[in-house]
Image: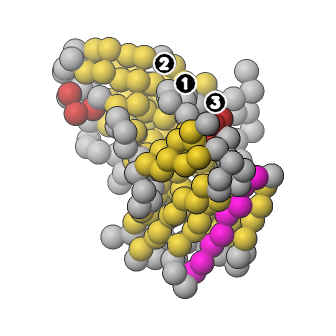
Amino acid sequence: GAGVSQSPSNKVTEKGKDVELRCDPISGHTALYWYRQSLGQGLEFLIYFQGNSAPDKSGLPSDRFSAERTGGSVSTLTIQRTQQEDSAVYLCASSFEYSNQPQHFGDGTRLSIL
Amino acid sequence: SQKIEQNSEALNIQEGKTATLTCNYTNYSPAYLQWYRQDPGRGPVFLLLIRENEKEKRKERLKVTFDTTLKQSLFHITASQPADSATYLCAAKSSASKIIFGSGTRLSIRP
């Protein structure tokens, strides 16, 4: 499709397991963003990529979180040793460049840690 | 710290009236503000962007204003319809290049 695609749409896992979330941005978009949204809350900015580079990783909640982007396209967000407080919807967005361009969002991955 | 605040968690208005949502920013001066709409279970959808040198921007029934003196943006929906019911988010880039979103205003339009 033409939009941002995220997979899986839902993920339930046990505390302590690792999870990997995937984002396929819109073709041609050089900027890619990851956000976390807890129930009834706003979006918490995690990290952005310009091309394959992430200039600022300080938004990641802890060192259990990491993200990468390859080929200027697909990105993965990995959470190691998951905790219950990691339960949230993880949203990905892309745009033509990292400036004032509108962001196009996927529908997110709903992560539940048991 | 730099913040984006949407003061109203929820707003309920009668169909046909104008809905006005508020976004305030503190401790910095963003070059632009964006407004998004989010429906339950979906990602946000971009609506409008307004730059600091623009007083007002319109798109169909939507209007956004940007007051750098008050450090505030107002988002208006005229002739509101039940289909306009959703959560509306404002966002801006911080000086540290992070994107900051407000917590959103849940708008309900009753018939």
- Vertical arrangement, residue B38 with respect to residue A19, above or below: below
- Specify the segment rendered in magenta: B61-68
- Vertical arrangement, residue A20 with respect to residue B18, above or below: above
> Counting other residues with Cα less than 10 Å from the Cα at mark 3, is it few (<14), some (14-19), or many (20 or more)?
some
Residue marked by disc 3: A4
Disc 1 element: strand
| Image position of A55 (left or right of A93) | left
Residue A7 can be seen, yes or no: yes
Q: Residue at x 50, y 30 (%)?
A: B40
Amino acid at circle 3: Val
Q: Would you say the residues marked 1 and 3 are in contact, meaning their CB atoms lie under 8 Å apart?
A: yes
The chain ID associated with circle 1 is A
Q: Confirm whether circles 3 and 2 share one chain.
A: yes
Q: Residue at x 60, y 78 (%)?
A: B67
The chain ID associated with circle 3 is A
Amino acid at circle 2: Ser
Q: Would you say the residues marked 3 and 2 are in contact, meaning their CB atoms lie under 8 Å apart?
A: no
Disc 2 element: loop
Residue marked by disc 1: A6
Instruction: Quarter of the image for the C terminus of chain B: give it.
Output: top right
Q: Residue at x 53, y 72 (%)?
A: B72
Q: Nearer the viewer, residue B50 or A32?
A: B50
| Image position of A91 (left or right of B62) | left
Marks 1 and 3 sit apart, C-alpha to C-alpha, by 7 Å
Give how far across and how far down residue B24 sits, in percent. 47, 69
Q: Would you say the residues marked 1 and 2 are in contact, meaning their CB atoms lie under 8 Å apart?
A: yes
Residue A13, magenta (yes or no): no
Residue A9: assigned label: 2
